[in-house]
Structure formats: structure tokens, C-alpha cells
Image (cartoon, grey):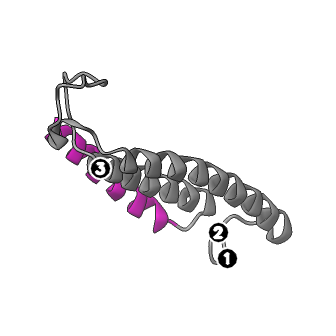
Amino acid sequence: MELVLSLAIGVLTASGVYLVLRPRTFQVIIGLSLISYGVNLFIFSMGRLRVGAAPILDRTDTDPASYADPVPQALVLTAIVIGFAMTALFLVVLLAARGFTGTDHVDGRD
């Protein structure tokens, strides 16, 4: 499970970096989104991966290692909401810039 998650984080981040380096603004926006998804998965994995464990623990279990850390989950949830809003803002700016310049290149040239 850890190998699959690590590969997913690596593929998302590498694809995002590749798209950020492209000359078109839409590809840059998608690349930033992929990088943010990779970072979200990385932060989420910091809360420990547990497969087959009960989500609710009984009162007899007082071992702190049995509990999942809720902070990474809250951070990822907040990052998803902020990332969605930033992507919408980037798309509006992209459409406005394309309307003013007539091109969607990052540097403004064809």
C-alpha cells in the first residue's frame, strides 16, 4: 500500500512539474493542480496508513498508536477547498488574459 501511494505521489508531482514548464497557460494551471494533489496525498499519508482497522475504537484501547492523527486530514480537506477556489480564479484570469492578448502563451508570444 505504501509503494502504491508513493508512486501516485511521485507521478502526480512529476506530471505537474512537466505541465508547469509548458508554454500554454491552461497546461500551467493543470500542472499546478496536479502538484497540489500530490502534496495533498503526501500530507494525508503523514497521518499513517492503516488498512483493515476499525474507524471507531472502544474505551479499553488506550494505546496512542491505535488512533489516527486528525490534523493531516483537516489540513488536506482545507487544502482541497482552497485549491478548488484557486483553480477557478486561475481559469477566470486565463480567460481574461486570452481575451486581452489573443493568445494563451505564458510569455504572450506565439
Asked where in the image residue 17 lies, by quadrant, the reply is bottom left
Taking the magenta stretch, the answer to whether it contains residue 82 is no
Look at the picture and state if 20 lies above or below 55: below
Instruction: Write down the residue under mark 2.
Output: 105
Outermost residue on the right side: it is 100
Q: CA distance from mark 3 to mark 1?
A: 33 Å
- The C terminus lies in which quarter of the figure? bottom right
**Label 2–label 1 contact, CB within 8 A:** yes
Asked where in the image residue 55 lies, by quadrant, the reply is top left
Q: Which class describes the residues within 10 Å of circle 3: few (<14), some (14-19), or many (20+)?
A: many
Labelled disc at residue 109: 1
- Which residues fall within the magenta stretch? 1-22
The main secondary structure of the magenta stretch is: helix
Place of residue 103 in the rendered image (x, y in percent of width and height, measured from the top left): 73, 66
Taking the magenta stretch, the answer to whether it contains residue 9 is yes
Labelled disc at residue 50: none
Instruction: Write down the residue under mark 3.
Output: 9
Q: Amino acid under label 2?
A: His
Place of residue 32 in the rendered image (x, y in percent of width and height, measured from the top left): 50, 59
